[in-house]
Image: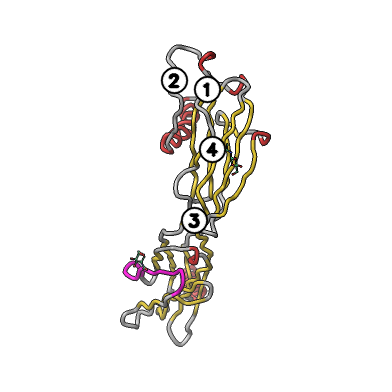
Amino acid sequence: MFARTMLVLLLLWTQDAVRSLRLVELRVPTHEPEGGMALLGCQYDMEGDTLYSVKWYKDGREFYRFVPKNDPPVYYFPTPGVSVEISRSSNTVVALVNLTQESAGHYRCEVSGEAPKFTTVFRQKYINIHLLPKGRPRVTGLKEQYNFDDMVVANCSLPPSRPKAHLKWLVNDKPAPSSYILGPWYRVSAERPDAAETILQLSFYATTSDFINGAIKLKCQATIAPLYQRETESTHYIALPYSIGTDAPEAKEIKDDATVVDDSLASLLIPIIFLILL
Ligand SMILES: *[C@@H]1O[C@H](CO)[C@@H](O)[C@H](O)[C@H]1NC(C)=O
Ligand SMILES: *[C@@H]1O[C@H](CO)[C@@H](O)[C@H](O)[C@H]1NC(C)=O
């Protein structure tokens, strides 16, 4: 009897303690590319209250309102950089399309209960909009073959991006020493003054230890975290008098992303398989 009374009291107490409109989750991406779309999610728990409205704001300005009592329940306020696809939006989701630089900002979801309390809860998050480069890093200045003590000089350049990209040179899959590197340089784009091309130069004298089985592998990696990472790779063979073996390999190969991903996946998996075998 006592236990049951305690249980009832406890239930009443917990019900009372949480019996208030609650914003459960605001699901908003932190980074999106220009031209893309974003789904903004706002999950709430009415806890017995009745929904009066869900409102969305960008940088303090209301752009979307859902009021179930209205017909239609959705209202959209035209706002620069905010293109809402109404057909895909509801009380819990807002679909933003055609993202531009202007779309970056603080997005707030605000949920209100009915009269007389009009309890209101809100949460907000920042969305960064990046301009991703069209294409992969481009490598210029390399020769098909090199000899010992030849100077290897190359530029890696990435089409305009915002923010600026991080470029990295690798020689035989190891980061190039800083003494091999010049730059980076940034060239502001003529058609997009908010974006810049990134250039990084590699230059070094090829020594015997740089040739592995008669070849040097060079790679330029470009990163704009967390949305973009691509690389361009080429293999350069030692000039003919020093050539080892009779079947001269292809002078130059550019690997595709897919191969590179496979390679790194394999290098991840092999130690795992090895561990399992142990
Ligand atoms: C997005 O852009 C396309 C192409 O310019 C246009 O047809 C469409 O109406 C835009 N969508 C919204 C919701 O503004
Ligand atoms: C590499 O780029 C820099 C900066 O734009 C330029 O001065 C240099 O001539 C370029 N070198 C090669 C080998 O393309």
Q: Which mark is residue 125?
A: none
Q: Position of residue 264 (x, y in %)?
A: 48, 34
Q: Within 10 Å of the Cα at label 3, are there few (<14), some (14-19), or many (20+) other Cα atoms?
A: many
Q: Looking at the image, which residue is at 46% across and 24% down?
A: 251
Please give the residue where the numbered disc 3 appears in the rendered image. Answer: 131
Q: Amino acid at mark 3?
A: Leu
**Residue 269 vertical position relative to residue 120 in the rendered view, above or below:** above
Label 4–label 2 contact, CB within 8 A: no
Q: Give the quadrant of ligand 2.
A: top right
**Colour scheme of the picture:** secondary structure
- Label 4 to label 2, Cα distance in Å? 22 Å
Asked which secondary structure carries label 1, the reply is strand
Picture disc at residue 215? 1
Mark 4 highlights which residue?
A: 220
Amino acid type shown at disc 1: Ala
Marks 1 and 2 close (CB-CB < 8 Å): yes
State if disc 3 and disc 2 touch (CB < 8 Å).
no
Q: Which residues are magenta?
A: 79-89
Q: Is residue 247 visible?
A: yes
Amino acid on which the number 2 mark rests in the picture: Pro
- At label 4, the amino acid type is Cys
Q: Which residue bears the numbered disc 2?
A: 249
Q: Of callouts 2 and 3, which one flags the residue occurring earlier in the amino acid sequence?
A: 3
